[in-house]
Image (cartoon, rainbow, N blue to C red):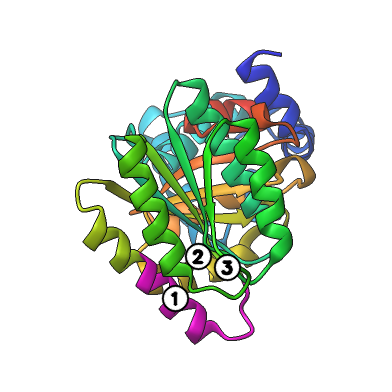
Amino acid sequence: MGFFSRLVNGLKNTKKSFSEKFKYIFTGNEIDEDFFEELEYILISADIGTETVSEILDRLKAEIKQKKLKKTEDSKELLKNIMKDILNENVAEEFEYPLAIMVVGVNGVGKTTTIGKIAQKFASKKKKVVIAGADTFRAAAGDQLKVWADRAKAKYVAGEQGADASAVVFDAISSAKAREADVILIDTAGRLHNKINLMEELKKIGKVVSREYPEAHYHKLIVVDGTTGQNSISQVSLFNEAVGLTDICVTKLDGTSKAGFLIELVSKYPDMAIRYIGVGESADDLLDFDASDFVDAIFE
């Protein structure tokens, strides 16, 4: 299956929700207030926040007026381009090496699986990868990550359950230097029952990376569950305050009809780039995010 076909198929729930409603609204009728009210309802139902929807509609009205459009069907491409513009406010840049990526997020979002899939993506590019199992609170996380590391032929460095996470990262950096690795992927704990302890642990890991591996290009990527929609934005805020996030990965988009919340996410955090989206279970279903392809896919 080609990239775009995989994307369209993975976003079929959102696509179905959008396309059926848009088929009705972009039918060649006159552009009037009823049209804008219907469009507002559709965008909000796709889990785009009201402020962002207002911005989209204001821009659409201005362009319609400027171009003197009369029919609703003539405004469809304008809407798509506005959505693409918002999503392109911060495009993920090409990675530079050596590279260290600390991956954060709450338990249950698919963080460990995502790290494994990222490792495979780098492996397919002939990059040497070291994975640091710095989630020392969940034994199952380490077992799962070891399986993914083996698949990607990556070196896996872990500590005993309950060990100091930053010590694991220190060991992983030492291993990466010895192996002349290109990438270190750092798994972290996702428990939130004691947020202060968790955030302090993440800060400590960051200090170890900066001190022991200053030559590395350091990214802090959060994994969020796409099925939770806008509810995940509070998680982004929490982790961003602690570590200063650079990248976002949204998983499980194949299980939701509200993938429009990505537009809300970028609108609220224009300094972060959506790096990856997950649209299925296989490693190939973790896709590099492309705003134009994403919007075209849900309108397809």
* Image quarter hosting the C terminus: top right
Q: Is residue 134 above or below residue 121?
A: below
Which stretch is magenta? 191-205
* Image quarter hosting the N terminus: top right
Residue denoted by label 1? 201
User: Looking at the image, which residue is at 52% across and 21% down?
Assistant: 124
By secondary structure, the bulk of the magenta-drawn segment is best described as helix
Q: Which mark is residue 236?
A: 2
Disc 1 versus disc 2: distance between alpha carbons? 17 Å
Q: What's the amino acid at mark 3?
A: Ala
Q: Is residue 201 above or below residue 70?
A: below
N-term-proximal mark, 3 vs 1: 3
The label nearer to you, 1 versus 2, is: 1
Q: What's the amino acid at mark 2?
A: Val
Quick one: SS at disc 2?
helix
Choose between 264 and 243: the one closer to the eye. 243
Disc 2 packing (10 Å; few <14; some 14–19; many ≥20)? many
Q: Position of residue 216 (x, y in %)?
A: 26, 46
Residue denoted by label 3? 189
